[in-house]
Image: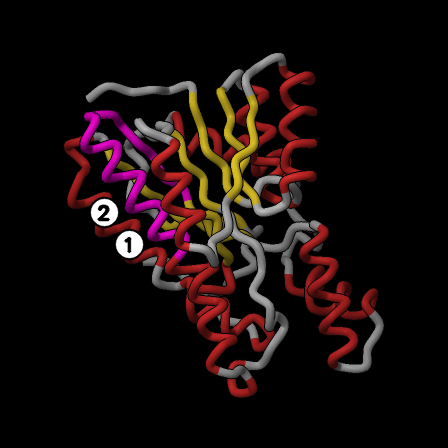
């Protein structure tokens, strides 16, 4: 199998966790493809990294709610990048109690966290197999998949299936250079996290700073959120360097989860 080890696709990469992961790849000199819905912000990030790291960085449109958007991207990337990191945004209903969620809420979450990402990953893996190229897919998920949280319950329930796909595909196609892993994140101080906390505060008639102290920092043993640049480097290494890590579910949460993953 041939390996194009200098091209990477990072989804939902125009801000937050995806932004820092894309920066890690661009900083290593990779031809980095930033995929997102927001053209203005996505192109601005691509331009910034291109100048900062003197490497090829481009933006492509991707909306996990839109099958045609996913299909178009997969067709454009042929052969697909050897390194693929699938990060996602947030469903419309978050935060929401699972028992108060409507049918459309479940469908929206399934498109963003399950159907869209797995359809894209499947198309890219098929492309790699057809062109006899290696491919490594890393999914960015949450430790709350292991220990679901009330106001994240819809997302936690839906995206739990990603781990099964990663294990299955890794076992089926290991000899052909296919790897897939899932990283379960703890808490990071991102725009998305702050927005979620603000919404939970409104929902519970609380102050955002109190929610942040109690529900975020208060549940982390080391009492600090993660460093997104450090995470970016970790994702880069797992995706591109450690070929014996495959089909793995990796918690990165400062022991926030009390469960043992098996």
Q: Position of residue 143 (x, y in %)?
A: 50, 59
Q: CA distance from mark 1 to mark 2?
A: 6 Å
Q: Position of residue 84 (x, y in %)?
A: 41, 36
Residue at the spot 42% in from the left edge and 19% down from the top edge: 6
Horizontal arrangement in the rendering, residue 39 relative to residue 208 (left or right):
left
Q: Is residue 40 above or below residue 258?
A: above
Q: Tag on residue 169? A: 2
The residue closer to the viewer here, 134 or 77, is: 77
Q: Is residue 6 above or below residue 41?
A: above
Q: Is residue 147 visible?
A: no
Residue at the spot 34% in from the left edge and 20% down from the top edge: 4
194 in the magenta segment: no
Q: Residue 146 falls in which quadrant of the image?
A: bottom left
Q: Position of residue 250 (x, y in %)?
A: 42, 48
Residue tagged by mark 1? Answer: 165
Label 2 near label 1: C-beta < 8 Å?
A: yes
Residue at the extreme top: 54
- Label 1 sits on a secondary structure element that is helix
Query: Which span is picked out in magenta?
Result: 116-138
The residue closer to the viewer here, 111 or 157, is: 111
């Amino acid at each position: 199998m041939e390996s194009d080890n200098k091209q990477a696709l990072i989804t939902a990469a125009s801000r937050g966790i995806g932004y820092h992961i894309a920066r890690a790849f661009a900083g290593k000199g990779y031809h980095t493809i930033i995929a997102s819905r927001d053209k203005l912000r996505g192109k601005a990030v691509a331009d910034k990294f291109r100048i900062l790291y003197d490497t090829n960085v481009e933006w492509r449109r991707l909306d996990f709610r839109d099958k045609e958007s996913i299909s178009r991207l997969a067709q454009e990337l042929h052969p697909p990048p050897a390194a693929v990191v699938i990060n996602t945004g947030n469903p419309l209903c978050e935060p929401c109690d699972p028992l108060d969620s409507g049918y459309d809420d479940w469908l929206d979450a399934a498109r963003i966290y399950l159907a869209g990402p797995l359809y894209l990953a499947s198309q890219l893996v098929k492309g790699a197999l057809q062109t006899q190229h290696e491919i490594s897919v890393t999914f960015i998920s949450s430790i709350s998949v292991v220990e679901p949280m009330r106001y994240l319950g819809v997302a936690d329930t839906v995206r739990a299936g990603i781990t099964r796909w990663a294990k299955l595909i890794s076992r089926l196609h290991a000899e052909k250079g296919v790897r897939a892993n899932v990283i379960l994140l703890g808490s990071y101080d991102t725009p998305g996290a702050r927005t979620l906390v603000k919404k939970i505060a409104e929902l519970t008639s609380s102050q955002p700073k109190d929610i942040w102290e109690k529900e975020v920092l208060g549940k982390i043993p080391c009492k600090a959120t993660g460093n997104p640049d450090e995470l970016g480097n970790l994702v880069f290494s797992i995706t591109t360097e450690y070929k014996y890590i495959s089909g793995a579910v990796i918690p990165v949460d400062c022991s926030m989860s009390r469960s043992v993953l098996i």
